[in-house]
Image (tube, rainbow, N blue to C red):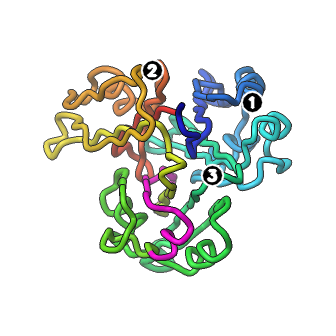
Amino acid sequence: MNKKTFIRAVEYWVPDASGSLLEFGGGLFGAAKRFEAATRNLCFGRGEGLPGQAWEQGHPLMLKDLQSPLFRRAAAALADGLTCAVALPVFVGERLSTVVLLFCSGDADLAGAIELWHNDPADNSDMTLQSGHYGNTGDTFEFLSSHTSFRCGTGLPGLAWDKQAPVFMPDLGRGSGFLRADSALKVGINRGFAMPCGSVDDHVYVLAFLSALATPIASQVDVWQPDALQSHLVHSFSFSETPSETTPRPEHNLALNDGVVGSVFATGVPVQDGQRIVCPVAMQDHITAVMALSL
């Protein structure tokens, strides 16, 4: 029996032909069947709902309470136990290519946190916590996180900022480079995954997932990055915490426009490929990597 994953659903929205609406592009909903049924026929204008707000504001948004008036599917989210969402807009230059939404649960038996970190270069050189959802980790870890900052290259968010690509830390114990290791281990958090996020300005955003062995971030995550010559996409890492026989084996070396992964890198538009979502990873307004996510 598979463990419950920290990410419970993922969906993506793409501009229609007129560029004035976001239409449903695809998604994985797991057991959230009522939420899936409430999703497929929706569309969002600029500034409407969580996807439209991320488009309008031009940067990632976290909604810690899906019962907010901003969220149009509140009843379905409540019925399926979804409590928190993050909207990740992806821009290619000034053009929006997609908005990816990730949903998490607030179940009492799920240990973990999701954090959105932010740097305004006009303000200082540090990255500070913009918003976070801490589930059952208690107040101490949340308090510590809100009083922590990172320089580029330091800690999990700082490493994703420096590398301009996703970073996975399988063990957040002492010596891992995770600055909050002692507090994390006390609440059962022992692994972390962070990725840079798109925006339309020079602000830097990093999304971080922190989880426990009993609460996998996802069943499988694969990441590809361009090589030094920008001629191929190289499979940089993967982690599989609840492996499935139906999960595709990662393609390890691809031309920049080869296959599903290459198409996503070239266009910035996600693709639902069986039981995985292949989506672009952006640093501000350009694609820096491709991530495949299976629930």
Whole-percent x, y for residue 120 in the image: 50, 71
Badge 3 is on which residue? 110
Q: Position of residue 101 (x, y in %)?
A: 60, 40
Residue 20 position within the rendered picture, expressed as x and y whole percent measured from the top left:
67, 31
| Residue ID for mark 1 | 35
Against 204, is 195 above or below? Answer: above
Question: Of all residues shown, which one is farthest toward the front?
Answer: 1
Specify which label sits upstream in the sequence, 1 or 2: 1
Within 10 Å of disc 2 (Cα), the crowding (few <14, some 14-19, many 20+) is some
Residue 82 is a magenta residue: no
**Residue at 50% across, 46% down:** 217
Q: Position of residue 46 (x, y in %)?
A: 70, 40
Q: CA distance from mark 1 to mark 2?
A: 20 Å
209 relative position to 142: left or right: left
The quarter of the picture where residue 159 lies is bottom left
| Front position in the image: 2 or 126 | 2
Which residue is depicted at the point 60% across and 67% down?
Answer: 130
Residues shaded magenta = 182-201
Q: Tell me the SS state at disc 3.
A: loop
Q: Check residue 273 in the rendering and tell me which mark sits there, or answer none.
A: 2
Earlier in the chain: of badge 3 and badge 1, it is: 1
Q: Amino acid at mark 3?
A: Leu
Q: CA distance from mark 2 to mark 3?
A: 28 Å
Residue 187 drawn in magenta: yes
Badge 2 or badge 3: first in the primary sequence: 3
Kind of residue at disc 1 = Phe
